[in-house]
């Protein structure tokens, strides 16, 4: 394990965790944007990764099962490992060695926040290790949000993943060293969440590369109105979900990279179901008060996507 000089809240890097401390956490998938709320709105979904971290005498042992097994690195560059180390650093605590076991259910590179879940899961696991031995060094949820958002540069997935439910998140400016904030939204009890997951993948950074530097003022104004409307629809007026999920800022530019997903969004919306690309795609999120029927599922199957009823999840935590 390497030490770095990075700390927050001025903790001195002096404490060493004993061997054999263990933390097991579960962390939810998340859907970002919810249509118009680009880099701001997020919703935690009921698909979970399990992360089991324990301290050892030396070295690093990483084991991955489920999604990403055989694909992700098993070295110190593994995202969960990086997040565990970042969390320990931030708390001013050090481990002589680590064992990290991941049981992953969140599909990778589909727009379901797998990378945010890996980061939040690693940070929360680190925080549980810290709490076990040095409770006075425990990081707050706000500190976890700063650290997690720093990994990706936007807080939408991370906030949903940490706090659960839905959240609106923002940063104090657009430059480096941003400070992130979030406010929870109480999702209306009648709203159900379904995802249509393709086998095709799309990396978030590639999908961000499709976005223009500038957009017309009319599109910005349209999205400002729809984002505000979406908060109302999500919390009080599910009958407004269809209009509340309209977007001109990102989905039109990304559609060419995920044509099947764009077609499914259009087909579901024509049938009155509030569908949007989940995060940077290509998964499609549907929010509705009734479950999509056999016809919708057949349309999705024909486009190579499988429907999953996921529901709204709680935030990451110990199991
Ligand atoms: N549980 C995990 N463990 C290790 N790396 C992960 C994990 N989840 C995601 N990643 C990394 O993040 C990448 C996907 O991130 P990204 O393109 O942002 O898509 P997503 O929408 O799934 O977050 C994966 O290819 C992998 O490198
Ligand atoms: N606001 C981001 C969200 C990315 O979410 P992911 O689940 O695809 O990582 C964006 O739209 O780029």
Image (spheres, helix red, strand yellow):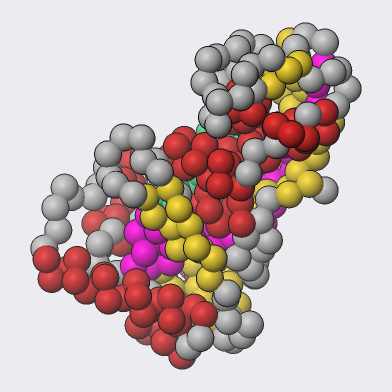
Find residue 267 and report its image quarter: bottom left
> In which quadrant is the N terminus drawn?
top right
User: Does the image show residue 136?
Assistant: yes
Q: Does the magenta-highlighted stretch encompass residue 90?
A: no
Looking at the picture, tell me which residue is in the foreground, 49 or 316: 316
Residue range corresponding to the magenta coloring = 29-56
**Residue lying farthest right?**
20
Looking at the picture, tell me which residue is in the foreground, 238 or 175: 175
Find residue 281 and report its image quarter: bottom left
- Answer with left or right where residue 133 lies relative to residue 309: right
Q: Position of residue 165 (x, y in %)?
A: 60, 65
Q: Position of residue 170 (x, y in %)?
A: 39, 55
User: Does the image show residue 72?
Assistant: no
Measured along the vertical axis of the image, is residue 295 above or below residue 308? below
Residue at 48%, 88% (x, y): give it.
237
Residue at 29%, 55% (x, y): give it.
254
Q: Does the magenta-highlighted stretch encompass residue 34?
A: yes
Residue at 79%, 20% (x, y): give it.
17
Label count reads: 0
Q: Where is residue 246 in the image (x, y as percent from the top left)?
A: 32, 75
Measured along the vertical axis of the image, is residue 309 above or below residue 171? below
- Answer with left or right where residue 314 lies relative to residue 246: right
Measured along the vertical axis of the image, is residue 26 above or below residue 244? above
Residue at 45%, 53% (x, y): give it.
181
Measured along the vertical axis of the image, is residue 299 above or below residue 43? below
């Amino acid at each position: 394990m390497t030490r770095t000089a990075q700390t927050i809240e001025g903790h001195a890097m002096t404490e060493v965790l004993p061997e054999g401390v263990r933390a097991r956490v579960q962390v939810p998938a998340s859907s970002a944007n919810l249509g118009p709320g680009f880099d701001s709105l997020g919703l935690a979904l009921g698909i979970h990764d399990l992360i089991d971290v324990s301290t050892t005498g030396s070295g690093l042992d990483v084991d991955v099962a489920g999604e990403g097994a055989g694909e992700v690195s098993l070295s110190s560059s593994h995202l969960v490992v990086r997040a565990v180390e970042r969390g320990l650093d931030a708390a001013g605590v050090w481990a002589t060695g680590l064992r990290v076991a991941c049981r992953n259910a969140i599909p990778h590179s589909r727009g379901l926040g797998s990378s945010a879940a890996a980061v939040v899961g690693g940070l929360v696991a680190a925080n549980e290790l810290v709490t076990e031995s040095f409770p006075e060094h425990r990081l707050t949820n706000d500190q976890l949000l700063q650290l997690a958002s720093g990994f990706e540069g936007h807080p939408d997935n991370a906030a949903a993943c940490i706090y659960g439910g839905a959240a609106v998140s923002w940063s104090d400016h657009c430059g480096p060293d941003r400070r992130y904030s979030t406010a929870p939204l109480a999702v209306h009890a009648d709203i159900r969440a379904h995802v249509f997951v393709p086998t095709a993948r799309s990396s978030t950074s590639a999908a961000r590369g499709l976005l223009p530097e500038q957009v017309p003022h009319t599109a910005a104004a349209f999205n400002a109105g729809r984002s505000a409307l979406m908060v109302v629809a999500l919390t009080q007026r599910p009958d407004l979900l269809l209009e509340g999920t309209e977007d001109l800022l990102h989905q039109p530019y990304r559609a060419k990279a995920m044509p099947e997903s764009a077609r499914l969004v259009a087909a579901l919306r024509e049938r009155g179901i509030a569908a949007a690309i989940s995060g940077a795609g290509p998964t499609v999120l549907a929010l509705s008060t009734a479950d999509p029927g056999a016809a919708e599922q057949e349309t999705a199957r024909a486009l190579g996507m499988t429907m999953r009823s996921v529901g709204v999840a709680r935030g990451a935590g110990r199991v």
